[in-house]
Amino acid sequence: MAGTIIVVGAGMAGLACATRLAAAGQQVSLFDKGRGPGGRMATRRAEVEGKTHRFDHGAQFFTARDDGFRARVEEWQRAGVVARWQAAGEEAWVGTPAMNAPIRAAAEPLDVSWGTRVAGIQSRDEGWLVSLDDGAERFSDSIVLAIPAEQAAELLAGLHDDFADRARRTASRPCWALMAVFPDRLECLDTLRGDDGEAVSWAARNGAKPGRDGSESWVVHASPEWSEAHLEDDAASVAARLLDAFLHQSGAGARAPVHMAAHRWRYAMADPVDGPPALWDATRKLGVCGDWLIAPRVESAWVSGTRLAETMLDSIDVH
Ligand SMILES: Cc1cc2nc3c(=O)[nH]c(=O)nc-3n(C[C@H](O)[C@H](O)[C@H](O)COP(=O)(O)OP(=O)(O)OC[C@H]3O[C@@H](n4cnc5c(N)ncnc54)[C@H](O)[C@@H]3O)c2cc1C
C-alpha cells in the first residue's frame, strides 16, 4: 500500500487525482482553502431584490477531447451535472445548474475538508507533516500539490528544487471578472468575444446557459492585458469601467444594472513551460498536478491529475 495520501487543492486536478487513487483503494484526504467546491470553476451568488442570482465567474465552458475525460464528462452528463452549451461552440460543455456542479459531484464521495488552507509542509523521515491554517497538523505517507503554479512554488520552496523550479518558471495571467444583473433583457447575443486590444475579451449571459433561470445576469471577463494594467485598482472602479466597455462592445447601449461586482482572479490562466504533464518523485512520495503543467483549461487539469494518479499507482504495488 502507498499508505495515506494528502492532496492539497480540490479543484479539477486534485479531484481527478484523488478519484483515480481512491478507485484503486488508496486512502486519500483532500484539503481546500475555498469555502465550497469550485476552485477556478467557482460559482458566486448574489441576492438582488429578493432573488438569488448565480454567476460562473471563473471558467466559462470546457471541452472534452481526451478519451478519458470525455468518458468522465459523459458520466456527469448522465448524472445531470453538465450539459452542452451551443452558444459557446459545438464542443462546449458547462456545469449544470452551475459551473461548480461537476466539482461538487466529484468531491462528494471523497474525504474533502473545505475552508482549510495548507500553510506549510515539512519532510519527515517516514513521510510528510502538513500544517493547516487553524494550527492543526496532519501526517501522510505521500503528498500531492494540486494548486496554481505560484502557490505551489511557495509550498515547494525548500522541499523539492526541481519541482519548485518548474512552478517558479510558470507565470499566470490575471483576469478581472464583472458580474452584473440588468432589470431588462439586453439587445445582444448570449456571448461576446472581444478583439485584440479591446478591454473585454469575453462576456456571457449567464442566465441563458443550460439549466439556469433565464435571468439577465452577465459575466464579463477583461482581457489579460487590461487585467494586468488594472491589477491593483479597486473593485468598484474596475466594475464601472468594465461595464462601460461591455455595453459599448456589445452594442447594448447605456443601461444601468441593478447589481454589479468585480472579482480579481490573480492566477487565472497559466502560461505553461515545457515538461511532463504531472510530476511525481517516487522516492520522496511527492507529486504535483494542475492545469499549469499542460494548458490553462479544465480538461488539462483533469488530464494532469489523472496522469499523476496513474504514475503514482505504477510506482507502488497496488493497481
Ligand atoms: C476567469 C477564468 C476563466 C477561465 N475560462 C476557462 C474556460 O473558458 N475554459 C477552460 O477550460 N478553462 C478556463 N479557465 C481555466 C480553468 O478554470 C482551470 O484550468 C481549471 O479550473 C484549473 O483546475 P486546477 O484544479 O488545476 O486549479 P484550481 O481550480 O485553481 O484548483 C486549485 C484549488 O486549490 C485550492 N488551494 C490553493 N492553495 C491552497 C492551499 N494552500 N491549501 C488548500 N487549498 C488550496 C484552491 O482553493 C482551489 O480550489 C478559466 C479560469 C479563470 C480564472
Image (cartoon, rainbow, N blue to C red):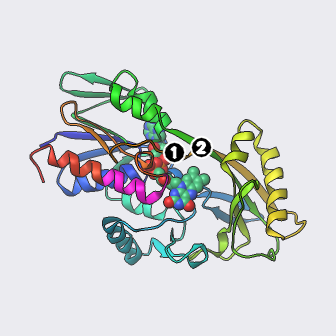
- Amino acid type for the residue under numbered disc 2: Arg
Q: Residue at x 40, y 45 (%)?
A: 293
Q: Residues within 10 Å of mark 2 (few under 14, many from 20)?
A: some
Please say whether residue 183 is one of the residues in the magenta stretch.
no
x and y, in percent, of residue 69 in the image: 35, 65
Classify residue 67 as left or right of residue 166.
Answer: left
Classify residue 125 as left or right of residue 220.
Answer: left
Q: Which mark is residue 2?
A: none
Can you tell which quarter of the image residue 32 is in? top left
Contact flag, marks 1 and 2 (Cβ < 8 Å)? yes
Up the image or down, 162 lies above or below 267; here it is above
x and y, in percent, of residue 307 in the image: 28, 52
Please say whether residue 301 is one of the residues in the magenta stretch.
yes
Q: Which residue is mark 1?
A: 271
Whole-Å distance between the Cαs marked 1 and 2?
8 Å
Dot 2: element: strand
In this view, the residue farthest toward the left is 317
Dot 1: element: strand
Q: Tell me which label, 1 or 2, sits earlier in the chain.
A: 2
Q: Which residue is mark 2?
A: 173
Mark 2 close to ligand 1, CB under 8 Å: no
Q: Nearer the viewer, residue 40 or 228?
A: 228
- Magenta range is 296-306
x and y, in percent, of residue 63 in the image: 46, 67
